[in-house]
Image (tube, rainbow, N blue to C red):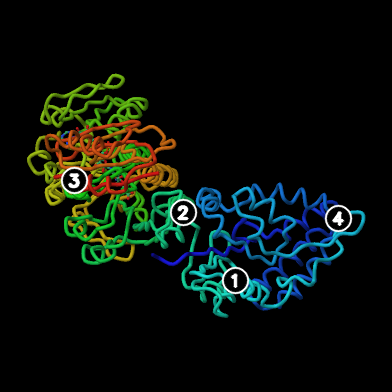
Amino acid sequence: MSEKKFFVIDFDSTFTQVEALDVLIEISHAENPDKEDLANQVKELTDQAMEGSLSFDEALDRRVKLLDANKKHIDTLVSELKGKVSDSFKRNKEFLSQNAEDVFIVSNGFKDFITPVVSEYGILEQNIFANTFTYDVDGNINGYDTENLLTKPQGKVAQMKELDLKGEVLVIGDGYTDYEIRKEGMADKFYAFTENVSRPSVVENADMVAPNLDEILYENKLPMAVSYPKSRIKVLLLENVHPNAKATLEEEGYQVELHKGAMDEEELSEKIKDVSIIGIRSKTNITKKVLENANRLMAIGTFCIGTNQVDLETAQEKGIAVFNAPFSNTRSVVELALGEIIMLMRNIPDNIEMMHQGKWNKSATGSFEIRNKKLGIIGYGNIGSQLSVIAEAVGMEVYYYDIIEKLALGNAKKCTSLEELLNKVDVVSLHVDGRAENKSFFGAKEFAMMKDGATFVNLARGPVVDVQALRDALDSGKLKGAGVDVFPTEPKNNQEPFKSVLQGAKNLILTPHIGGSTLEAQENIAEFVPNKLIDYVNTGNTFNSVNFPNLQLPQLNNAHRLLHIHRNEAGVLAKINSIMADYGINIVGQYLKTNEKIGYVITDIDKAYDPKLIEALKEIEGTIKLRVLY
Ligand SMILES: NC(=O)C1=CN([C@@H]2O[C@H](COP(=O)(O)OP(=O)(O)OC[C@H]3O[C@@H](n4cnc5c(N)ncnc54)[C@H](O)[C@@H]3O)[C@@H](O)[C@H]2O)C=CC1
Ligand SMILES: O=C(O)CCC(=O)C(=O)O
């Protein structure tokens, strides 16, 4: 039988998010003009005591003198503290009350406010060890019980000696006095609790740093309120994604690492090993080799539209869901495309170049309005169709070509072949996606089909265009000008040099893949993608995933949710349900969706079940991944 475990928990900044005396002084001095100064003095004394730089009894004495509080203030304090219990203690209330015999509060705070707060979590009064205030006849605090062990230096150690717990003693706290219990041999383990505050002198002495109570319960294989501690979910964000993404993911409780640039295959194959979620933009290739090393990876977020940089099929085979931001930067691309078209029709790139060289060339030759010019959009998706509407609004006549049937917006005219479009229009704007079949889709043959003196814009994907053929078309005068934002090979970061056969061509706008790089777009993406990832982790929702069957699931209420990802083979659902029946499971809800390769079955079941059920489900032939959520 394993040894009995005792949990010895500190109160201030551990059980609650705050230091109670800091709050009390704000309450008792609410009307005092010097309240800020007094509050700062109390905070400073608390910090010094917590870090171990001031003896606890001296700090306590000085703080109580500054309080000037009475019983009524204590009542107000208690109701404030009840709202400030640490989140992980709140959610693990069931564990605390079910193990009440083994849970102790040992605090240098005061029972007067501790007892009413922790009692709501089932903690037994006889297991609360803390100081007590003394009051005068009018109910004003006039001191504290100086005989109490916890008013003395090393008081917690002395209290633990007196308690003499027989079993494994785990101390959880944020202060030096908590660590002292372990230091003096009265505990087996000290967890530096950092959910509310992290003190270097405490963290460096800890057996383990615990960002929350879930982490401690998980480490001790004890039942907890969440299926997996969020603090164990490691997120790697590459390519300078907007800082809001990091903030959102950290707020959710994940560990987030941010890198400015992309990573190559070698580096990423190593780095990915302990990562649960990765966020990238267009320059990081998540290849088969990377995925083969990604043993903990649950989801990939592309903080952009394109997903051609991810081996979607291998990700799917490994049960890794991929999410992108299909709409967040589309407007930015459209604005740049239209801006470039206007610039190119007026020969502005050449004009700029000449002005920098000191040449004044005021001329209307070869300069045109875009009004009444024919714009040909290739790829009438989210960007192409939006450009269609805006270009039409500024007077262009819009034609489009797409490989699938698309609704013509406004007065746009559909072309039934690429050739038809290329023969007809004055400006070609490419907005196809980067699927493998589109590699070199636009080359010498297509440029030849364009009208002489036409303009060409590519803000889609680099490999789609044969850039040597584009250079030839510019040099020969076949094209009037071009705008290119994307290239077959692009630098991994802003330090690497850029090289292209296009450099030096006439009337050519070259931009460093910034079609979607506006603050608005990046902010939109940083909101959209992290929320998709969090939703997938928390509920299993795959709505908008680019490689998983799309399922929008209801909230999980008072049930456990089993997410079973399997190869799409006949009979898997039947096998799942037959195992559920064997274990006498009451199914509360079930959802299934498949695509060509995988099936995704979500089953919500009653909370009480034999844990062997999970193993049995994992053994079903064709299972890729099984996740349990609660
Ligand atoms: N430069 C930049 O910073 C940005 C570039 N992009 C790129 O823009 C492109 C378009 O994005 P969305 O409109 O959001 O994509 P989308 O998927 O909504 O639309 C693409 C359209 O192209 C069509 N298509 C694919 N291959 C085709 C072909 N060979 N011929 C004709 N039509 C074809 C598809 O049927 C689809 O309707 C993507 O490659 C995306 O990665 C997107 C955002 C920013
Ligand atoms: O801004 C980026 O990183 C890439 C933009 C892009 O090409 C996309 O959204 O597909």
Q: Which amino acid does the dot numbered 2 rest on?
A: Gly
- Identify which residue is drawn at 22% across, 50% down: 310
Q: Amino acid at mark 4?
A: Asn
Q: Which residue is label 2 attached to? A: 253
Query: Residue 32: which numbered mark, if any?
Result: 4
Quarter of the image with the C terminus is: top left
Would you say 602 lies left or right of 292 here? right
The N terminus lies in quadrant: bottom left
Residue holding disc 3? 623
From the viewer's side, name the closer residue of 428 and 574.
Answer: 574
- Which mark sits nearer the N-terminus, 2 or 1? 1
Left or right: where 13 falls relative to 25: left
Q: Which residue is mark 1?
A: 178
Whole-number angstrom distance, CA of label 1 to CA of label 3:
46 Å
Answer above or below: position of 47 versus 625. below
Going by the picture, which residue comes out furthest to the bottom?
184
Between 395 and 177, which is closer to the camera in this rendering? 177
Query: Which badge, 2 or 3, comes first in the chain's sequence?
Result: 2
- The residues tagged by marks 1 and 4 sit, at their Cα atoms, a distance apart of 34 Å
Q: Residue 397 versus residue 46: which sits nearer the camera?
A: 46
Instruction: Please tell me which of labels 1 and 4 falls first in the chain.
Output: 4
Residue 452 in percent (x, y) is at 15, 36
Please report contact status of discs 2 and 1: CB closer than 8 Å, yes or no. no
Sequence-wise, the earlier of marks 1 and 3 is 1
SS at mark 4 in the image: loop
Question: Going by the picture, which residue comes out furthest to the front?
Answer: 1
Asked if the residue at label 2 sits under 8 Å from ligand 2, the reply is no
Give the x, y percent position of residue 85.
Answer: 61, 52
Gap between marks 2 and 3 measured at Cα:
29 Å
* Circle 1 crowding by C-alpha within 10 Å: few under 14, some 14–19, many from 20: many
Mark 1: amino acid: Asp
